[in-house]
Amino acid sequence: MASRENGRLGAGRQSRVKRTGLRRTVMTLGIMAVAATVLVFMETTWNEPPAAVDDTASVSYAVGAPGPGAEAPDFSLASTAGGTVNLSDYRGESVLLFFHEGIGCQPCWDQIRDLDAAQTELQSAGVDQLLTITSGPVDLIAQKMTDDRLTAVALADTRLDVSVTYQTNKYGMMGESRNGHSFVLVGPTGEIEWRADYGGPPNYTMYVPVDEIVTQMQAGRTDA
């Protein structure tokens, strides 16, 4: 009796061992299959060409108020070069106002850098003068202009009075406490000829290639 019982116990152990071995084999084969699938997927992905980028896509913008056809509100702001600048000083010329977020927004300063370098292109498009406007203390703005070796006329709208008048503070990432990224073209008679507020949602654009700005400005002036 004891011998038969021991035999049954031994057979049971062997059966369990076989089942355990079978499960391990199945698990191993499953892991190998998953690994092979991952490798094939990775190899396929690595060998795929990168997705094409549409370099011709236009940057969208809003048009705030005051907009084209309206009289541009005059202003007097402190300049980083010293003294004050009045918009009315440029009556008879086409002036491009660039309202930007300012300190802490390096893409905004990169924008000024590229506008500086594109003076010939801007003049060919009919822009006689570029005025950049941002909030912040005039001395800090002047220091940033010096650090980045920028030569544009930079004006300090420290209390945001002019920005609120032009409502350019409605198109940024900082609520209404800072500007977004807005361009306002004021014609020789003081009338706004084109406006583009790039900085609003959902993209919060803080830099636009100069050629894109010029193209959209010329198209906007033509349509006006």
Image (cartoon, rainbow, N blue to C red):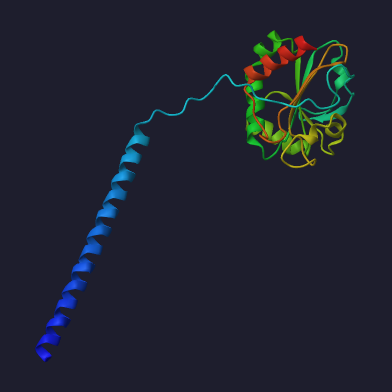
Quadrant where the C terminus lies?
A: top right
Seen as rendered, the residue at the extreme left is 3
Q: Is residue 68 visible?
A: yes
Residue that appears at 85% across and 10% down? 92
Q: Is residue 10 left or right of residue 43?
A: left
x then y, percent, for residue 49: 39, 28
Does residue 60 lie above or below 95 as drawn?
Answer: below
Residue toward you, 182 or 60: 60
Residue that appears at 28% across and 49% down? 33
Seen as rendered, the residue at the extreme bottom is 1
Occupied quadrant, residue 138? top right
Q: Is residue 193 left or right of residue 208?
A: right
Q: How many marks?
A: 0
Q: Is residue 150 visible?
A: no
Q: Is residue 15 left or right of residue 145?
A: left
x then y, percent, for residue 6: 13, 85
Residue that appears at 34% across and 35% down? 44
Residue toward you, 73 or 1: 1
Residue toward you, 221 or 18: 18
Occupied quadrant, residue 50? top left
Quadrant where the N terminus lies?
A: bottom left
x then y, percent, for residue 9: 17, 82
x then y, percent, for residue 41: 35, 40
Does residue 119 lie above or below 44 as drawn?
Answer: above
Occupied quadrant, residue 183? top right
Residue toward you, 10 or 213: 10
